Amino acid sequence: MTALGIIGGGQLARMLVLKAAELGIRCTVLDPKADAGAGQLAPQIVADYDDETALQQLLQSVDVLTYDFENVPAAALSSLQAGERLAPGVEVLHVAQDRLLEKRLFRELGIAVGDFFAVNSRTDLLAAIDQSGYPAVLKTRRLGYDGKGQAVLRGQEDLERAWQQLGDHDLILEAFIDYQFECSIIGVRSRAGEMRCYPLSRNHHEQGILRASRIGLAAADAGLQRQAERWLQQIAEQFNYVGVLTLELFVSDGRLLANEIAPRVHNSGHWSIDAADCCQFENHLRAVTDLPLGPVTVSAEALMINFIGDLPEVRRWLQVPGLHWHDYGKQPRAGRKVGHATLCGADRAQFSERLALLESLADGEAMPSLPASMR
């Protein structure tokens, strides 16, 4: 039996553990939170992510290491010297943890990206806004996620407020992109270099948090799919990547612009558990443990809905045919992802019928305000 160590014990690790059991893979997780979701299902080492003793303990007890989020301290993993036993490797973390390095990588690889500017002082910020103009987005280079660590600048007043809030950090100013929609491409690469990609997912955010992802519609443009796959493969080959890799994208004027990478399984791919022949979690496990990759073909139209803060009434939602429920075992808290549901239909007509039924039965607060293009 293969033993896998997972650094991070949140819902992504939890879903990895669930799939690992089906493959006969034994998991141990490391997370500083004693009530970590994955720790409810697998042995857990309760320790900080940069605790060298705990990391060594984990490494010595498993065959392979992986992680479920990109902000695990890269320096700690570098000092661990896990070599090929750590997948994905440390190099991609250094880039994924720094928005400026990430954007520069896109340019180096010839991947289209919006204008961006390094900001290390208020003078830099004023010079950058002169070039980009308003509106623009000021972000911390590190640690921001789900809308945190960033501010939209629509005028001088916003600029001053954002500088007071974020000016103590290394920053990046990004020109505002007038996009039609957001999407993401998720792929998996084996240790032998084989790459497989899932269909593009069309994504809907509210207050900076992903609320819904839809497949079956976004994949209709074969040109966008091919372009996204080429870019994802370029990035994966740059790092000799092993595991699941995600590239978040904007579609602006009918063309793709890269936003950021996530070197892990990704929220916008949760639909794959219920609608793909082999989900992102199983394929990540297959890749890092050197098993053959599974098929990424999709068998249904699907919509994934995130539950933020608290779960709705499960009995009401499960009245809908094709509805799959996923509870992360978390305590309710404002802004926290506590679960998701995936609604599937064999074709567009059946999906639309089921969505209408769900919207008539569901608690309105749990349903996102879906744009017409995702219905």
Image: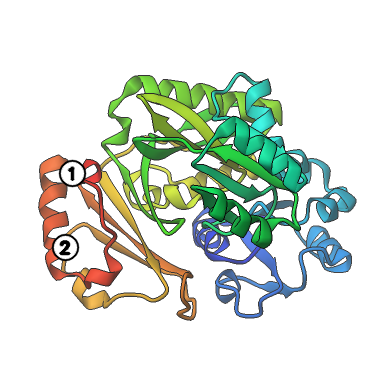
* Structural distance between the alpha carbons of marks 1 and 2: 19 Å
Residue furthest to the front = 156
Label placed on residue 10? none
> Within 10 angstroms of label 2, few (less than 14), some, or many (20 or more) residues?
some
> Within 10 angstroms of label 1, few (less than 14), some, or many (20 or more) residues?
few
Label placed on residue 359? 2
Residue 302 percent location from the top left of the image = 27, 47
Give the residue drawn at x 50%, y 60%: 15
Residue on which the image places disc 1: 346
Q: Say which amino acid is labelled 2.
A: Glu
Give the residue drawn at x 62%, y 44%: 263
Would residue 275 be seen by someone viewing this image from the given angle? yes
Q: How many marks?
A: 2
Which residue is more in the foreground, 251 or 304? 251
Give the residue drawn at x 46%, y 75%: 334
- Residue 86, placed above or below residue 177: below
- Residue 290, placed above or below residue 82: above
Q: Say which amino acid is labelled 1.
A: Ala
Judged left or right of residue 111, residue 22 is: left
